[in-house]
Image (cartoon, helix red, strand yellow):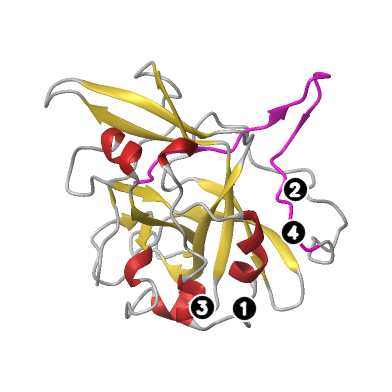
Amino acid sequence: MCNRFSAQLITLKDGTQRWIKVTFADSEYKFPFGTESFPNPPLPDRPVYYPGYDVFCVSHDGEAVTPEIRIWGNYPPWAPTRIANSKSENIFSSKHWGKYSTHNRCLIPATAFYEWEYETEKIKHNTKIEIAGRESFVFAGIYGEDINPKTKVKEHWCTILTQEANDRMKEIHNHGENRWRQPVILADENLEAWLDPSYNDPEKLSKLINSYPSSWVIATRIPSDIAPRKKKQENTLFDIED
């Protein structure tokens, strides 16, 4: 959790399309190339992104805001497989995540995320979650570079932070060892501080990670076979603590 999300092209009323915009509250805080959206994105317009896929993210290199493409998920030393999410509660104290979270923070824009809502042990519903009144939103993330132990190739990765779920999300994400969790969605006014590598006090950073109310959650049940994977899905662990 979250292990599926959408970051699709947005179709405007006139029929034209564009990628998600990341708009900052401070007008001086912007991309160096003068636009709020990704220029000529080389990624395919996938209906759904899974761990192990390349995804868009936004970081700050100390001089400017930078759009990047990174693989979703990381291989910490103790984990047998890729980890897609990091628990926000221990993100700054963790031996592994702590070395990234104080400086290497990123934004991951999305239009929706997905969970399986269990009615019984045998009956589950594919549920799409959107945010009320928003065409898009931004996950809090961290990023880094490590060697993939399977391919021996250096990967530029990112993970999505999670937190305790609100009441509505607890009803939806109600099964499994990692139930009752939700991805961290940042408030617009906190985007600049989350990206700023010089803003590195754990106590202050923790205050940027706020929960969102159940009233934000727009949940829609969708067909179980929507957005079939184009490649074999990796086994993935979530929210592992070291």
Residue type at tag 2: Phe
Label 1 vs 3, first from the N-terminus: 1
- Camera-side mark, 4 or 2: 4
Label 4 vs 2, first from the N-terminus: 4
Instruction: Identify the disc placed on residue 197.
Output: 1
Residue 155 at x, y = what percent?
A: 49, 63
Which residue lies under the disc numbered 4? Answer: 25
Mark pair 1, 2: CA separation: 21 Å
Please report contact status of discs 1 and 4: CB closer than 8 Å, yes or no: no
Say few, some or many: other residues with alpha carbon within 10 Å of mark 4 (under 14 / 14 to 19 / 20 or more).
few
Task: Kindly state the secondary structure of the residue where label 3 is placed.
Answer: helix
Please report contact status of discs 3 and 2: CB closer than 8 Å, yes or no: no
Q: Up-down: is 27 above or below 44?
A: below
Task: Kindly state the secondary structure of the residue where label 1 is placed.
Answer: loop
Residue type at tag 4: Ala
Please report contact status of discs 1 and 3: CB closer than 8 Å, yes or no: no
Which picture quadrant has residue 168? top left
Which residue lies under the disc numbered 2? Answer: 38
Residue type at tag 1: Pro
Mark pair 4, 2: CA separation: 18 Å
Q: Which residues are magenta?
A: 1-26
Mark pair 1, 3: CA separation: 13 Å
Residue 177 appears in the figure: yes
Residue 156 appears in the figure: no
Q: Quadrant of the C terminus?
A: bottom left
Residue 20 at x, y = what percent?
A: 69, 41
Mark pair 1, 4: CA separation: 18 Å
- Horizontal placement of 147 versus 133: left or right? left
Say few, some or many: other residues with alpha carbon within 10 Å of mark 3 (under 14 / 14 to 19 / 20 or more).
few
Q: Residue at x 79, y 47 (%)?
A: 39
